[in-house]
Image: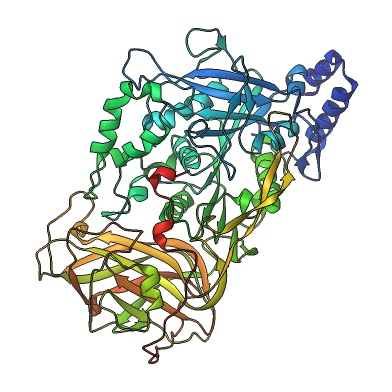
Amino acid sequence: MARLIELPSAVVTILRIRSLAIVATLLAALTVSLTGPASAYAAGTAAGPVRNGVSQPVYSYAKAVRETVWVDTGLDGAGDGHTDRVAADIIRPSEPAAAGLKIPVIMDASPYYACCGRGNESQLKTYDAQGRPVQFPLYYDNYFVPRGYAVVLVDLAGTNRSDGCVDVGGPSDVNSAKAVVDWLNGRATGYSARTGGAAVKAGWTNGSVGMIGKSWDGTIANGVAATGVRGLKTIVPISAISSWYDYYRSDGAPLYSGTPADLSAVVETPATVAHCATVQQQLAAGAPYNGDWTALWQRRDYVASAANVRASVFVVHGMQDLNVRDINFSQWWSALARTGVDRKIWLSQTGHVDPFDFRRGPWVDTLHSWFDHYLLGVDNGVQRGPVADIERAPDQWTQDRTWPAPGTVTSTLGLKPGALTTGAGGGTASFTDNPARGESDWAADVDRSTPDKTAFTTGPLTRDLRMSGGGSVTLTVTPSTPSAHLSAVLVDLGPAAIRNYLGTGEGITTLTTRSCWGQSTAGDSACFLDTAADKSQVDYTVFSRGWADLGHYAGLGRTVALTPGKAYSITFDLAGTDHVVPAGHRLALIVAGTDNGLLDPPATDPTVSIDLAHSWVRLPLVGGPGQLPQPVRRNPAAVLRGPVAGRPGTVARPDTFR
């Protein structure tokens, strides 16, 4: 139920305020609260003035309260007989508390504040000689604290100044952040010191929390939301994992050779390593290289708990993110569709990049409105606007009122030798796995017969064909060896200007100029290096991918040794995307074995034959497929040009997950 500030208590508060400036600010806030829309949320009302639908920067960043509270998680991750405390570094405007007003919280829980840094400039937390926080990485504090928000940056368990062991997305990881949400809502105990100290209460907050973060940080936001914790009103997961299995494995196939233990070793505080050896061993043992689903993965599958989510969700992901691959956003989005929570999504052409670095001005404005609505209760209409923003070409965006796009139909396309068809498939095709080649090689050779892949194409399209969402591939195949990996990629065959997602900036170039977003102090600048789109002119674009291990054809529970010469059927996902294949271009599905740089190879290099009569692809196409033109014979010497900056193997590996 919505409610307004009660006038009598607010008037009493005003009488206690000495500063005329604060009186003016409070009166403005009361005016908004008393005359504003009745839809303001009960948990939050703006502590400062709201004009034109957004909160205003009326508070002093320089005079903000900066403090650290260690929150008791109630867990003993290290098994030393003491419950763990996690460090929450807090910055909040001093004026609202002096006026008796309570404010909401923007929270980023991360393992990277000491080891690796946050943002394009890898900012770390810094502290003064007394251990008080000085620099809060990123711009959230500089921009939002003057507008009446607290910003809380949490060191996940086992990192920086927190106790415990790194659990890499598991219960301790998630609960170390959830405990801070509980403390902000009066349900957990905080202390003034890491050991001992006095109990500290968060009397300055109204308990409304919004979690945000990129990569591991955004992943924790997903995990905390999936607990259903009360007080968490919204999350903004950027390039985030929804199920850790789908970070390391893809339908049984190993995307990376490592385990969560390798990632833990990168971020864990050196002093805790000896105490956390058992946890490290569990992380390694629970993630078998063979791709089997285990209890470890089950505990890190937030999609399975999506029904618990109460918070609104603003998803941001790069459609060419080859680090946290796109299945993570698309399956999370689909699961959330069944919960009824408010959702919004931005999909860029970048790789693993924060929107602050690919669409800075519109991003800050949209995020500002989003937080004002869900944390301050401002009826600014952000929840009624377009649900989806999609980048079509570098810095060129379109919007949709829902996502997947209105009119999207799951369409089945058949496979014939060399052809994608709206009719039934038939015939056979084959390939021999060559781990030295990958999707760029396959796409460049799409019109040449090569032994390492088989391609199915349309003729030049007579109209634009848009895929919006995630698809799937069903293949009936016969391997020549006891194990086989499968890759399937969708390719737009035709010239385009795209972001150079294989470049070092994964689609952006960092400039030497700076722009400022909020207020600064000597120890924490609000000015950040500008960026621009890094562009490539290409002749083809790979826009959706899927990988699988044929030994998991019957399910992920247990890998099966294949019988050479026996046929098996398997269905696996193609990652979510939103791509338009323009009229005049061709659509291709390429099926092969190891995708070099993106999939670890099998123990053998099998030859795989495909029964096309019992194989197909299902794609979410806007308006359906129509009648796809049949392919014509191409020049067998043609070689297409893809992204020029490098091969897929140049993308970040798990030790650079941030």
Q: Quadrant of residue 44?
A: top right
Q: Quadrant of residue 90?
A: top right
The residue at 78%/31% (across/down) is 48
**Vertical placement of residue 624 versus 278, above or below:** below
Give coordinates of residue 14: x percent, y percent: 84, 18
Q: Let me know if residue 58 appears in the view.
A: yes
Q: How is the image coloured?
A: rainbow
**Vertical placement of residue 17 versus 561, above or below:** above
Number of disc labels: 0
Is residue 151 or residue 637 the one in the foreground? 637
| Residue 612 as seen in the image, left or right of residue 504 | left
Give coordinates of residue 639: x percent, y percent: 42, 81
**Vertical placement of residue 656 versus 394, above or below:** above
| Residue 310 as seen in the image, left or right of residue 283 | right
| Residue 20 as seen in the image, left or right of residue 542 | right
Picture quarter with the N terminus? top right
| Residue 172 as seen in the image, left or right of residue 534 | left
Q: Residue pushed farthest front?
A: 512
The residue at 33%/12% (across/down) is 81
The residue at 31%/18% (across/down) is 79
Give coordinates of residue 622: x percent, y percent: 51, 72
The residue at 56%/40% (across/down) is 122
Give coordinates of residue 653: x percent, y percent: 40, 49
